[in-house]
Image (tube, rainbow, N blue to C red):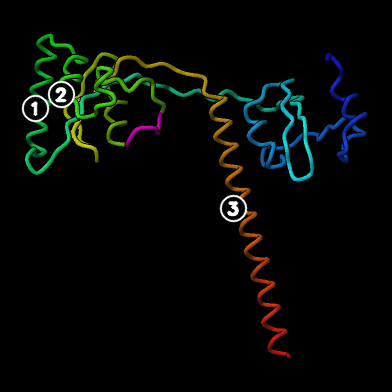
């Protein structure tokens, strides 16, 4: 405990960078060994992770520095809704009229949450008074998100149609959130998917080359 990472690497590492204290140098996320990407994306400077198993052995990694670590801030919205689903017996017009009636009751003083519990077809959120919690951009379907974005905190929408049915939407609050950690994780996942796709393509091309070689040999024989 308390030993210097570099000294331990020099004494114990079997990797090619062992003599340099295990230092891999500056690398972009896409140039980091695939097995380390998810770990590095969630690490802060001086964090240590491991042991991490790979085909070549076990690894312990330490993040020494980060460059260009800009914050990624998103505007999140706390929102609740009432959903009415349509059917052969309950048309779009029926849903709109019912929601307009519920909205009028809210204007007259009825509570949104109480009406959501009593009337919403989204049973999971209805139990919480229609609350969907804090949501980030891109999480909800476009028609819902557009209507939500145009509302101020406390404001209630007119009936809004999505592929799920008809909604009344109320924005409860809005705030900026530092989403850097989640953003870096998503970048890491995308990079990992890209690397895996490239590896699969290379494997596929290698198989094609091998099969083409076999065909030529058979024809010559």
Q: Quadrant of residue 90?
A: top left
Label 1, label 3: how far apart the Cα atoms are: 49 Å
Q: Residue furthest top?
A: 109
- Residue at mark 3: 197
Taking the spot 29% from the left edge, 20% from the top edge, the residue there is 131
For label 3, the SS is: helix
- Residue for point 69% across, 84% down: 216
Q: Which mark is residue 119?
A: 2
Element carrying mark 2: helix
- Give the foreground label among 3 and 2: 2
> x and y percent of residue 178 in the render?
52, 20
The reply to whether callout 3 and callout 2 are in contact (CB within 8 Å) is: no
Give the label, 1 or 2, closer to the camera: 2
Which residue, given by chain and number where applicable, does mark 1 sit on? 98
Q: Are marks 1 and 2 in contact (CB under 8 Å)?
A: yes
Q: Is residue 138 magenta?
A: yes
Q: Main secondary structure of the magenta part?
A: loop
Q: Which residues are magenta?
A: 137-141
Q: Position of residue 154 (x, y in %)?
A: 26, 13
Q: Give the spatial CA distance, label 3 vs label 2.
A: 46 Å
Instruction: Place residue 34 in its image quadrant.
Output: top right
Quarter of the rendering occupied by the C terminus: bottom right
> What percent of the width, then of the height, locates residue 100?
10, 25
Q: Earlier in the sequence, mark 3 or mark 2?
A: 2
User: x and y percent of residue 130 in the render?
Assistant: 25, 21
Q: Is residue 192 left or right of residue 61?
A: left
The answer to which of 111 and 142 lies nearer the viewer is 111
Identify which residue, 110 or 148, lies in the foreground: 110
Residue 157 left/right relative to 88: right
């Amino acid at each position: 405990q308390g030993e210097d990472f570099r000294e331990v690497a020099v004494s114990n590492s079997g990797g090619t960078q062992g003599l340099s204290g295990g230092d891999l140098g500056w690398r972009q996320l896409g140039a980091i060994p695939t097995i380390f990407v998810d770990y590095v994306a969630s690490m802060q400077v001086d964090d240590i992770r491991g042991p991490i198993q790979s085909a070549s052995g076990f690894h312990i990694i330490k993040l020494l520095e980060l460059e260009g670590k800009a914050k990624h801030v998103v505007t999140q919205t706390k929102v609740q809704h009432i959903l009415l689903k349509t059917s052969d017996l309950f048309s779009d017009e029926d849903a709109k009229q019912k929601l307009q009636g519920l909205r009028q009751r809210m204007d007259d003083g009825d509570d949104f949450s109480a009406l959501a519990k009593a009337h919403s077809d989204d049973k999971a959120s209805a139990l919480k008074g229609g609350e969907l919690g804090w949501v980030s951009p891109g999480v909800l379907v476009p028609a819902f998100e557009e209507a939500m974005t145009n509302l101020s905190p406390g404001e209630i929408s007119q009936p809004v149609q999505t592929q799920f049915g008809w909604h009344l939407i109320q924005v409860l609050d809005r705030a900026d959130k530092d989403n850097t950690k989640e953003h870096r994780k998503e970048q890491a996942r995308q990079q990992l998917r890209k690397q895996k796709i490239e590896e699969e393509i290379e494997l596929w091309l290698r198989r094609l080359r091998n099969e083409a070689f076999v065909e030529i040999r058979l024809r010559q024989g």
